[in-house]
Amino acid sequence: MKKVIFLLYIIMFFFKTSATANYEKKFYDFSIESINGEIINFKDYKNKVILVVNTASYCGFTKQYDELQELWDLYKEKGLIVLGVPSNSFNQEKNNNADVKEFCDVNFNINFPLTTITEVKGKNSHEIFKWAKENHGKSAVPKWNFHKILINKEGKIEDTFASMTKPMSKKLIKTIENIL
């Protein structure tokens, strides 16, 4: 198991690249549909720090929902938005939004914003993920579920974190605290 994790780190490091970010658009120029069918207009998140996480109900990292909720509870009053983006891009999500919402409510008592089930990679990915790749490079493209993209108060990508980085990790917490 340690060898597999080590190899994953090597592969992720090898493919990590940064694009030259010209940021014709900022994160706040986009919107997405919430799991309840309402539009989440990211303009409402201006001057906030946003952690965008593609999630899935049947993933080995699904337990990270607990730490995402903890992170939200600790920092929402200081200006952090945790945004869960359920995705079936890796074939590990439930079939419909109602089932995802119920799963998150019953198992994790999630109260941070969730979107509808959304594509996060490839040509059919949501425009925020295309924007992230264009402005931050391959490291912004989710390679698995629970990939994290941290948006700073200026609406630009501050950093990205692999699925293995837990939401309450020192590395992620330090980065969030530095930009709040």
Image: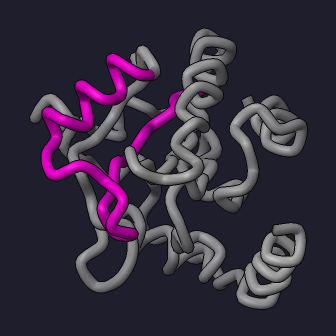
Residue 83's quadrant in the figure?
A: top left
Residue 177's quadrant in the figure?
A: top right
In the shown orientation, is residue 46 left or right of residue 85? right
Residue 127, can we see it?
no
Whole-percent x and y of residue 104?
A: 36, 27
Q: Residue at left 16%, top 52%?
A: 95
Whole-percent x and y of residue 75?
A: 66, 17
Q: Residue at left 39%, top 75%?
A: 121
Residue 154, can we see it?
yes
In the picture shown, does residue 57 fall above or below 14? above
Q: Which residues are magenta?
A: 80-107
Residue found farthest to the front: 1
In the picture shown, does residue 43 fall above or below 78? below
Whole-percent x and y of residue 62?
A: 52, 42
Residue found farthest to the bottom: 14
Residue 71's quadrant in the figure?
A: top right
- From the image, which quarter does the N terminus lie in? bottom right
The tally of labels here is 0
In the picture shown, does residue 176 fall above or below 92? above
Q: Residue at left 46%, top 57%?
A: 26
Display coloring: one colour
Whole-percent x and y of residue 44?
A: 35, 29
Q: Residue at left 50%, top 68%?
A: 132
In the picture shown, does residue 48 fall above or below 28? above
Asked if residue 101 is among those painted magenta in the image, a careful observer would answer: yes
- From the image, which quarter does the C terminus lie in? top right
Asked if residue 90 is among those painted magenta in the image, a careful observer would answer: yes
